[in-house]
Image: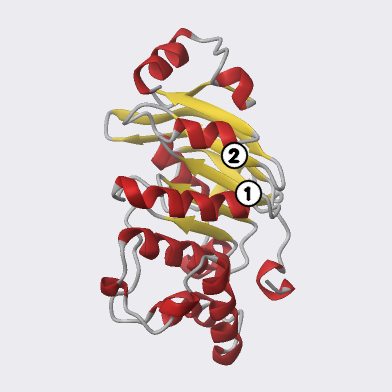
Amino acid sequence: MTSTALDTAAATVEVRDVHKWYGAHRVLNGVDLTVRPGEVTVILGPSGSGKSTLLRVVNHLEKPEIGHVSLNGELIGVRRQGDRLKELSERAILAQRSRIGFVFQNFNLFPHLTVLDNVAAAPVATGKLAKPEALELARELLGRVGLADKAAAYPRQLSGGQQQRVAIARALALRPGVILFDEPTSALDPELVGEVLSVIKDLATSGTTLVIVTHEIGFAREIADRVVFIDDGRIVEQGPPSEVLDKPRHERTRDFLSKVL
């Protein structure tokens, strides 16, 4: 792969005292998290613990009631006005999101576009690349995820695993400082999980900052620099996989792992 698709700097992500609630239900309760450049952070936790909401707060798809997120020191979604935080314009937020890749559970590909055009669309829409350059980059990235021969296909003609690999290539096309993965294998048939995890493993060795919500414990053990366990909207514990997965300190972590291992 040429340097074109890797022409990006891994970002630092900082989450500071983030609270998020829906009505009376508090989903995130004072989350503090720092993800260093090039680090692979895997987030584990039971269903409803706030994992996916945390990812959506990072790229401002969800707005926190309290707290803030920054990327390389720049506030995401807001700016300081005196001692208060003021929401940015939608255009400014979209520009910031172009530096934060997001891979969803259910692919979210455009059904009316070919695979090649799905990958090329975002760099063109954001003004980062002209159409010919974006198509060249898209071909390069499809080769990287093992789908060079599917460039002219439409999403409906692909397996779930292939669609998710296209979604990963699409996230890479913006040359983001960080890529967020929200349970990237949960919608896949078991026999298709491995091909997607293999692509993510390749990314993990490339120096890209990754934050991955997953229920694949073996994958977390293999790929993570750090494992973060969340329960009831709080970070219960975090550390290297050898500590959190093999010698968890907190009873809630031990109870969760006993049910999934």
Which of the numbered marks, if any, corresponds to residue 190? none
Give the residue type at disc 1: Ala
Examine the image and state in which quarter residue 118 appears. Answer: bottom left
Residue 245 in the image: x percent, y percent?
54, 21
Is residue 70 toward the left or the right of residue 258 in the image?
Answer: right
Query: Up-down: is 104 above or below 237?
Result: below
Query: Up-down: is 246 above or below 182?
Result: above
What secondary structure is found at the residue carrying circle 2? helix
Residue sitting at 59 percent across and 79 percent down? Answer: 137
Residue 261 in the image: x percent, y percent?
40, 22
Is residue 224 toward the left or the right of residue 156 in the image?
Answer: right
Residue sitting at 44 percent across and 81 percent down? Answer: 151
Residue 100 in the image: x percent, y percent?
56, 58
Q: Which residue is mark 2?
A: 223
Give the residue type at disc 2: Ile
Q: Which residue is mark 1?
A: 204
Count of number-bearing discs: 2
What secondary structure is found at the residue carrying circle 1? helix
Q: Are marks 1 and 2 in contact (CB under 8 Å)?
A: yes
Pointer 1 local density, CA inside 10 Å: few below 14, some 14–19, many at least 20: some
Query: Up-down: is 64 above or below 48?
Result: below
Residue sitting at 47 percent across and 71 percent down? Answer: 147
Viewer-nearest residue: 121 or 188: 188
Residue 6 in the image: x percent, y percent?
69, 67
- Whether residue 81 is visible here, answered yes or no, is no
Is residue 105 toward the left or the right of residue 88 in the image?
Answer: left
First in sequence, mark 1 or 2: give its number: 1
Viewer-nearest residue: 29 or 149: 149
